[in-house]
Image (tube, grey):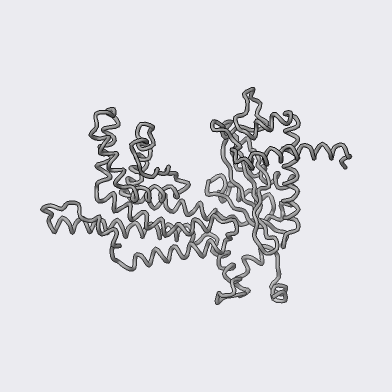
């Protein structure tokens, strides 16, 4: 039990932190400085002054020892509130979610997230940020389970686990998902993050077609070209986005920016390719990019990519929502597959793509035009086939039993409450069929 003096100290600590935050927010001031790194922290042992306003105020208001106590106190209060919510949830089970990233010391920083149902609403809370000195699956598994138990939760109540598709996490024999089941002496189903799978669909589908792969390589080169300080003043269009394999949203944003600012891109490439004021390497690179950008195939692929990614964009947004769930993810992916197949069944070129078929306007031969049209048509429908096959391969068989069981809990489904199909769920949480029937 805290005595009155300790309580007063704690109130002073919290009041100091809240006062700093309130001052910055009311005056619309940034908390981090313009040169703040992602590793600046209140417990940094460096002799350099902190760069952000929050850290400066914090350092001015409190000593280092007191700052650490304040941070620990705030963290424990938040953690206790999260654990209390989980322990008083609608059911005693919860889903474990974890993701990690390496820091400058090559240690793996793991975010441990708990997903549970409270008052009929799915909720997610960050329980803790843990650190694993070793990057092996066994070490990461021990770190995650220790974090859960030390936080005040019972590891045996883990109902499911959700990670990315890295082998150290998803391995069926030696991955974290397998080791968690072994440590808890029960089967804990693993769900590969749907949003991460959706990104992998785009990456793998693109890699199957050299033309699409080259298109994104050109986009990446153009992104690096246009972001040079000497060229930013010449380019008047919207900025392109960096392309990342883990996030295809940049692919859609960059493609949209290219189509909306095509004339501005051609103008700056033409200027750099013909001007004597730029250096030789910039001139040569601009000429090469211009040749690619003005090619009809480049524009055709750009329109095609935008159409494909816009079909997947709603699924990307829904699956990132905090209140999303497995059934919603399965439903929206099924809708994406249906939309893709419907596009293919039309067997005709979209009107906005037809303009990109002719490569020359003078003395063009009918046979040459037909060959170009045939080739671009092949690219278009092959791209659809690749996306559909990737979607079906990654979302088809995995968790099929759980998907079928969840659909049986949906009142509009024809198999609503068919007990034979609910076994995947009832066996997992040890519910007898008779009690489920009585409860309904």
Q: Position of residue 241 (x, y in %)?
A: 42, 44
Q: Residue at x 59, y 68 (%)?
A: 405
Classify 372 as above or below 331. Answer: above
Nearest to the observer: residue 425 or residue 8: 8
Classify 120 as above or below 368. Answer: below
How many marks can you see?
0
Nearest to the observer: residue 18 or residue 411: 18
In the figure, residue 305 lies in which quadrant?
bottom left
Q: Residue at x 55, y 77 (%)?
A: 414
Question: Which quarter of the rendering shows the C terminus?
Answer: bottom right
Q: Residue at x 33, y 55 (%)?
A: 303
Nearest to the observer: residue 218 or residue 15: 15
Judged left or right of residue 278, residue 173 is right
Question: Which quarter of the rendering shows the N terminus?
Answer: top right
Judged left or right of residue 384, residue 179 is right
**Residue 187 in sight in this render:** no
In the figure, residue 136 lies in which quadrant?
top right
Q: Position of residue 418 (x, y in %)?
A: 61, 75
In the figure, residue 46 lies in which quadrant?
top right
The residue lying furthest to the left in this view is 363
Judged left or right of residue 312, residue 156 is right
């Amino acid at each position: 039990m805290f005595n009155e003096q300790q309580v007063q100290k704690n109130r002073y600590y919290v009041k100091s932190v809240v006062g700093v935050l309130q001052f910055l927010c009311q005056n619309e001031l940034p908390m981090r400085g313009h040169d703040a790194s992602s590793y600046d922290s209140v417990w940094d042992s460096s002799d350099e002054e902190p760069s952000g306003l929050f850290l400066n105020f914090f350092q001015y208001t409190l000593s280092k020892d007191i700052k650490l106590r304040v941070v620990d106190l705030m963290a424990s209060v938040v953690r206790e509130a999260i654990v209390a919510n989980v322990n008083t949830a609608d059911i005693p089970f919860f889903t474990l979610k974890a993701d990690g990233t390496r820091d400058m010391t090559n240690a793996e920083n793991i975010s441990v997230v708990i997903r549970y149902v409270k008052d009929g609403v799915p909720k997610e809370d960050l329980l803790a940020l843990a650190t694993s000195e070793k990057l092996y699956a066994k070490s990461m598994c021990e770190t995650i389970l220790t974090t859960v138990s030390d936080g005040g939760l019972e590891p045996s109540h883990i109902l499911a686990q959700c990670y990315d598709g890295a082998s150290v996490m998803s391995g069926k024999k030696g991955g974290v998902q397998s080791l968690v089941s072994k440590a808890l002496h029960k089967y804990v189903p693993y769900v590969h993050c749907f949003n991460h799978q959706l990104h992998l669909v785009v990456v793998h589908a693109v890699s199957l077609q050299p033309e699409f792969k080259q298109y994104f390589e050109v986009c990446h080169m153009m992104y690096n070209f246009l972001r040079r300080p000497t060229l930013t003043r010449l380019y008047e269009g919207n900025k392109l986005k960096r392309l990342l394999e883990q996030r295809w949203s940049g692919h859609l944003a960059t493609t949209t920016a290219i189509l909306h600012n095509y004339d501005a891109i051609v103008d700056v490439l033409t200027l750099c390719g013909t001007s004597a004021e730029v250096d030789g390497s910039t001139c040569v690179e601009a000429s090469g990019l211009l040749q690619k950008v003005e090619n009809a195939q480049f524009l055709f692929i750009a329109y095609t990519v935008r159409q494909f990614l816009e079909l997947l964009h709603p699924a990307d947004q829904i699956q990132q929502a905090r209140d999303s769930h497995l059934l919603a993810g399965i439903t929206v992916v099924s809708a994406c597959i249906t939309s893709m197949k419907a596009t293919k069944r039309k067997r005709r070129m979209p009107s906005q793509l037809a303009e990109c078929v002719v490569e020359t306007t003078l003395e063009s031969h009918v046979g040459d035009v037909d060959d170009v049209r045939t080739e671009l048509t092949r690219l278009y429908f092959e791209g659809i086939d690749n996306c559909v096959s990737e979607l079906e391969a990654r979302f088809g068989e995995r968790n099929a039993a759980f998907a079928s069981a969840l659909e049986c809990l949906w009142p509009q489904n024809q198999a609503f409450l068919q007990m034979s199909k609910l076994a995947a769920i009832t066996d997992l949480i040890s519910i007898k069929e008779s009690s489920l029937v009585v409860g309904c």
